[in-house]
Amino acid sequence: MKIAVVTPVPWLPRAWSLDLNLWLDPLREAGHAVEVVGPLGSEPAGASRFRGVTTESLEASGFWCGLRYDLALVYTWMGRPALLRAMRSAGTAVVAVGDTDGQLGVRCHPVAQLQRMWLGQRTLGRRLRAGCYWLKRYWFLYRREDAEVVAALALAAATLVPTATARAALRPLLQRAGREDLAAKLVVVPHLISPAILSAPVARERGPLVVALGRWDDEQKAAPLLAATLELFLARQAIVQVVIMGGGGAAHFGPLARRHPGLQYLGRVPHPEVGAHLARAQVCLITSRWESFHLAGHELLCLGGTLVGPGVIPLPDVCGAGPFGTMSASRHPARLAAALESELRAWRSGQRDPVRIAAYWRQRLATRAAVEAVLRLGAREANLVA
């Protein structure tokens, strides 16, 4: 097949933790002709075939008619119906990548929507304006916003969401719109994991090491909560080592590291170095306010570690699948510290088996399974298979 991987916004390495090559390489190895289509000047690293276009071209059916793709894997983030409509009119089968936690619809998830709008602003004035706009959305704009999500779902052959919890969270929006039938188009396909992680040796013996990763200058990652949790935890657990990775955290974690010698804040580190720390860790501590999918946390699962955090995606899916972590009852630092202590006790008492943990998650997150699912969905839509 001739396949396009479409990114309607620039794919910036520091802005996105996802690696498009994890889709491109296995599709090419399977014998398909694959190229990336995206805005001019935004070629992703490693994309050997890239077609740069204007935003206007992306939403023009004539542009897609001339290219004649059999299948397109399109990052839509649960929107972009104009783009999907143009591709469908050209006869291209479309599988959309939702990359969402499912908390869409200001009437369905009002608190989550307000939190994201509020925290995305740096000054009080901007936050107050964001709150006013949230009210406008809640009372007047919600129908149009919901209709865009519904239209995008209807136009795609399938929309990939990374967790079952995200899929469930989208149901209220579909119910409100009277389109519960579209739930069948929501297919749970986790984000792809690097082959280097999936094939790495699994250390059965590992010391009490806790890791945390994130863009710590982003309010989503809740650096102050992580610092407060570790302050309480390390005051009682001096023998445990903690490694924090990711830029923007010096103000939060520098003073903490000076008070607790067992804690290291490394800042931004190359991905191979991240993998080396994950390979010897027992636990990844997550304090995010929201996540569509915690990539580093799932990489740790594939290396035999476990997760600790509040009941934010992906913790319900992970902890509901087996003995793969501990969820905190709330986002309070004391509750998170207690959950971390509980998980480390499980490790000390032999209740966590790295080899079994890695085997389960490597099978669940196998790249081949995800790619085959996308090809199946696209082929069914394009009538390329019976």
Image (tube, helix red, strand yellow):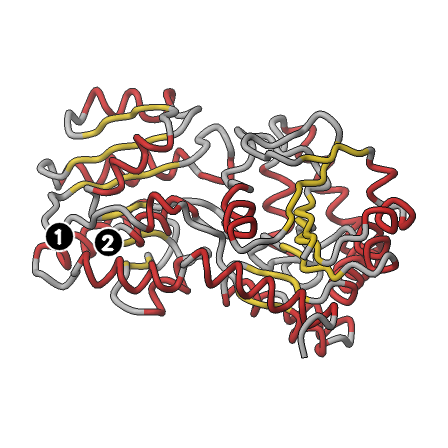
Q: Closest to the observer: 385 or 113? A: 385
Q: Which residue is mark 1?
A: 204
Q: How many marks?
A: 2
Q: Position of residue 269 (x, y in %)?
A: 36, 26
How dense is the environment of label 1, judged by Cα within 10 Å: few (below 14), some, or many (20 and up)? some
Quadrant hosting residue 280: top left
Tag shown at residue 166: none
Mark 1: amino acid: Arg
Quadrant hosting residue 223: top left
Q: Which residue is mark 2?
A: 304
Q: Position of residue 305 (x, y in %)?
A: 24, 52
- Pointers 2 and 1 in contact (CB under 8 A)? yes
Q: Closest to the observer: 30 or 180? A: 30
Q: Position of residue 291 (x, y in %)?
A: 50, 49
Mark 2: amino acid: Gly
Label 2: element kind: loop
